[in-house]
Image (cartoon, grey):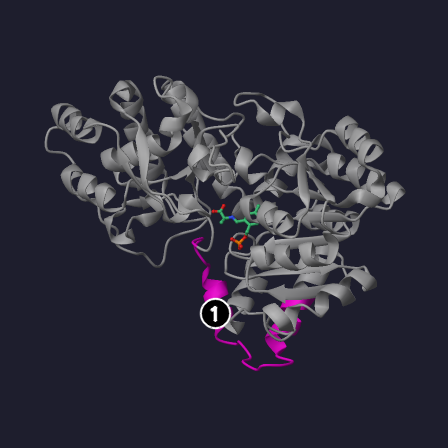
Amino acid sequence: MTKVKFLSGESIPLEMHKVRMVQKVNLHPIEDRLDAMQGAGFNTFLLKNRDVYLDMLTDSGVNAMSDNQYAAMFQADDSYAGSETFYRLEATLQDMFDVTHFLPAHQGRACESIISEILVQPDSTVLMNYHFTTSKAHITLRGGKVEEIIIDEGLSITSDHPFKGNMDIDKLNEAINRLGADNIAFVRLEAGTNLIGGQPISLQNMREVAKICRDANITTVFDASLLADNLYFNKVREAEFADADLRDVTREMGRLMDITYFSGRKLGFARGGGILTSDDTLFTKMRSLIPLYEGFLTYGGMSVREMEAMSVGLEETLDFDVISQTPIFVEAFTEELTARGVPVVTPPGGLGCHVDATAFCDHLAQPEYPAGALAAALFICSGVRAMERGTMSEERRSDGTEPMAEMELVRLALPRRVFTLSQVKYAADRLAWLHQNRELIGGLEFCEEPEVLRFFFGRLKATSDWPEKLVTAFRADFGDSL
Ligand code: F0G
């Protein structure tokens, strides 16, 4: 993606690819969308794709693949052990991150399970810039604790800090002194910090964290799942790297961290994952778990076709035109919403646009799930499927009380190379309409609440007839338009 000046003087994002394969999508009338939302228990995870117009639930496993990726799939060498496909992927990753070892795994959370199993002891602590749901779950499952030491700006919705995903260096030193290095299982840095709005981490911050940890003999772990977006920001927001080759930036990151892992559903435009290290001892420990949980060492639960696609996709990640598409669209989306008074996380990050449901639905209390209600209302008035990232996504405590989330966000993910600018504008326009009519959005309550991962499977209902009133207001303003 690049930006070009139009005659009007406006800078317009321009796709640096053309679309050669398409999938038909449906935009049903609003009454049918209301039925679909009710059928899904007001939980966007439970919607059927056939009822969705724009699927902005996630960027995981739904990024568009290139012609070269599809072509590479044909040369997949299918064998249980020793396939050429594995050696091609291994060589790509070794070169990209400047590491000696690669262990394949079926997706990102499988890597997290293996890393936690070898490093987390009961009552040990993992320090991190911010958690991701699965990364935290694997640590706590093994009796470990998580402490987040992100810079203060990371948790404020609006900011102009260019790297809101940075770790606070003073807090890191303080935590090491307080806990003692021996009680710290590892320090985890997440690229493109997902849950705070896809916010990047600077390479300078990674250098500082790595030095402190190396001096204190603490293992560092880098979650590179959202590295593509992060690399874009290293280049455009970190002066030192303005002219840098993305390959050099990535290789430095790989050298700084003891372990790097990634979800190949995000990084590499395919599906799978893997762990990288140059540390022989860590490698040997982790290696023994791969055949146990994932599959033999030369496929780790992945299909060889996906591995071929990933090798090519990883190379494409080092092309600035390719990786800039999502961040530039997120910026356009965020700017459009800000101009129209819709509260969003700023500065724009990667992954998607994040709407601040606390401000959007300031008439709703947190136990009424403002982010869940906003995601449901958005689907009803647009057919756009977003993801709740607020209190609904928290787990109830063992005493039955409900922790309130630090932020109530609705995430509109922009899978890479999938949507067009007019589709993004449509989503922004319907959100702007919803914002003008926000008083109509009411609360939700659980009618079926699973004990674990309730946000995936739980079913809710509206606390009044607000969804029907929303439909009436939509019809009054848009007539018989979809
Ligand atoms: N780390 C980060 C930063 C992620 O965003 C994800 C997944 C994972 C690890 C786990 O990887 O799904 O391959 O097992 N994020 C998805 C999302 C689920 O929708 O944001 P996985």
Residue hosting label 1: 71
Q: Quadrant of residue 161?
A: top right
Q: Residue at x 41, y 25 (%)?
A: 366
Q: Quadrant of the C terminus?
A: top left
- Residue 92 spot, x, y in % from top left: 66, 63
Examine the structure image and report whether residue 45 is included in the region drawn in magenta.
no
- Residue 5 spot, x, y in % from top left: 45, 29
Query: Can see residue 466?
Result: yes
Q: Residue at x 52, y 40 (%)?
A: 398
Q: Nearer the viewer, residue 314 or 463?
A: 463
Query: Can see residue 425?
Result: no
Q: Along the horizontal axis of the image, is 112 left or right of 448?
A: right
Q: Residue at x 62, y 57 (%)?
A: 113
Q: Residue at x 28, y 32 (%)?
A: 377
What kind of residue is marked 1?
Ala
Q: Quadrant of residue 383?
A: top left
- Residue 125 spot, x, y in % from top left: 72, 42
